[in-house]
Image (spheres, helix red, strand yellow):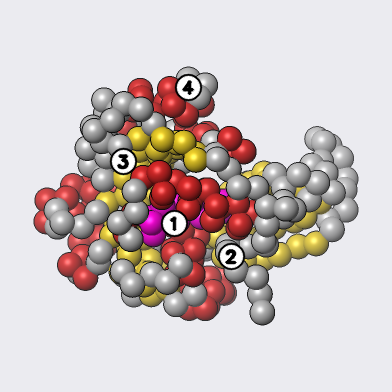
Amino acid sequence: MKKILGVGIATLDIINRVADYPVENSEIRILSQDIRRGGNATNTLTILSQLGQQCDWAGVYVQESDGLRILQELERWHINYSACRVLSQGKMPVSYVTLNTRNGSRSIQHYRDLPEFDFASFQKIDLSQFDWLHFEGRNVLETLKMLQFARQQFPQIPLSLEIEKPRDNIEQLFPLPDVLFFSKQFALAQGAQQATEFLQQQREQSPQAILSCAWGSQGAWGLQPDSETPYHAHAHPPERLVDTLGAGDTFNAAMIDALLRQQSLPAALEFACATAGKKCGLDGCRIYKKD
């Protein structure tokens, strides 16, 4: 068992399942509704906990009903949140998710009115206790300070960074992590049409890192620091597609777990694709069926 710190957000997800995605200015019936914790960093930690790792979350939560609900679910997965910044006023972020039961796709409307986790809070954490630090690619200037501090003060601890969406100046973060997880969404926004093309373009900005890019039903590609030829792993779709929400976070978690177990990059990509596919056949951020 290794100890992992995840830096990012937690949200309250309100998930509405519908038979088909609604057209604009229409009215449809919701088949079912779930309310549960979400957020990229805490999703990744939830999967890592199920894979047997010890996990801590560093983020911001508010002492209110939604915040309490989120903490209760983190406790269920044995995720420590003592590194968080705690506020007495405010509201936890909420994601309104429309989940199409016909094909498993999801559309998200996100409401946020909460400060981001900052470098001052990060500095208070005893990083020496961790075997891996994972960051969401958000709040760029503060995250840059965190990555620089961790790299300078604790060079032995691997750093990973998830890049999901284009953000102003986010490329400043790329030279610092040991592992970079790029989304298909980000790659397409950079003008790339294929994962291999995108990873080769990124190599110049991140010569030090393992690069990966998941590409949905086409699987995922990964590139070693000393190579120009990406590895590929095929997707592992479930027998029945149930819920794709959190699939990318699951992929990232499984990659971290495999790399911590000293697996090769091809083996880590294969394990990550298989684990993400398994999750897509289950509701929620789970890779095991309920008892």
Query: How far, Cα to Cα, is label 1 from label 3?
Result: 15 Å
**What residue did someone put label 3 on?**
210
Name the residue carrying label 2: 286
Amino acid type assigned to the residue bearing label 2 in the image: Arg
Nearest the viewer among 73 and 243 is 243
Characterize the magenta stretch by its predominant secondary structure: helix
Front residue of 124 and 153: 153
The quadrant of the rendering that contains the N terminus is bottom left
Answer with left or right where residue 242 lies relative to residue 153. right
Query: Which SS class for mark 4?
Result: loop
Q: Position of residue 9 (x, y in %)?
A: 44, 57
Helix, strand or loop for disc 3: strand
Q: Which amino acid does label 4 sit on?
A: Ala
Residue depicted at x 27% and y 51%: 159
Residue appearing at x 57%, y 70% in the figure: 66
Question: Which of the two discs, 3 and 2, labels the residue nearer the N terminus?
Answer: 3
Q: What element carries label 1?
A: helix
- The earlier-in-sequence mark between 2 and 4 is 4
Which mark is drawn over residue 253? 1
**Magenta stretch contains residue 173:** no
